[in-house]
Amino acid sequence: MKLPKNNYELTKFFKNARTPNVYEFCGEYFVDMLTVLPSLRKFSHRKVFYIENDRALGYNLLFTNKIWGHFFLEDGICAEIDSSKVVVINYDRLENSFISNRIRDYVKCIDDTLYIGRFNYLFMGKPQFLGYFSLTKVK
């Protein structure tokens, strides 16, 4: 499915998408920034998800094996969009820098292989929306 490239249309998709379970994410997903920020897809930007000690965890990959941005998944609320339930990709981990540990992505499911996310950055303790992205399961 091809997603639109404007915030208005993407917000409709986000509102109507299903709230996923944190444990349904498994393996690699391509990341494609849809609005505002440039996409790193041409650098083979992926997120890798796995379960360890009953926790849903992951990290970002660029190119073949450049790891950056470790995260964990948790249930959350997107107050900006009807206080809808979401999965939060939370970068508040010791492995990350003081810049990347403020990233909070809100994710919902469009279908079994496609997710839509809102990229947020904590500023003065509040999430600031920076753009939409998609996650597509690597086959």
Image (cartoon, rainbow, N blue to C red):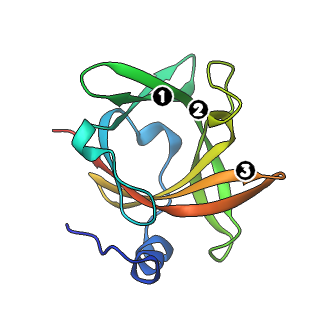
Q: Residue at x 72, y 50 (%)?
A: 122
* Image quarter of the C terminus: top left
Q: Amino acid at mark 3?
A: Leu
Q: Is residue 98 left or right of residue 39?
A: right
Amino acid type of disc 1? Gly
Query: Image quadrant of residue 98?
Result: top right
| Residue annotated with mark 1 | 58
Q: Tell me which numbered mark, 3 or 1, is placed earlier along the sequence.
A: 1
Q: Residue furthest right?
A: 124
> Dot 1, how many residues are within 10 Å of its Cα: few (below 14), some (14-19), or many (20+)?
many
Q: Secondary structure at mark 1?
A: strand
Q: Of the numbered discs in the image, which one, if any, rests on residue 72?
A: 2
Indicate which disc, 2 or 1, sits on the residue closer to the N terminus: 1
Tell me which amino acid carries mark 2.
Answer: Phe
Question: Where 16 sits versus 97, above or below?
Answer: below
Residue in the image at 50% along x and 47% along y: 21
| Image-based side of 95 in relation to 119, left or right | right
Residue matched to label 3: 122
Q: Percent x, y for residue 63?
A: 26, 27
* Tag 3 secondary structure: strand
- Look at the numbered disc 2 and give the secondary structure of its residue: strand
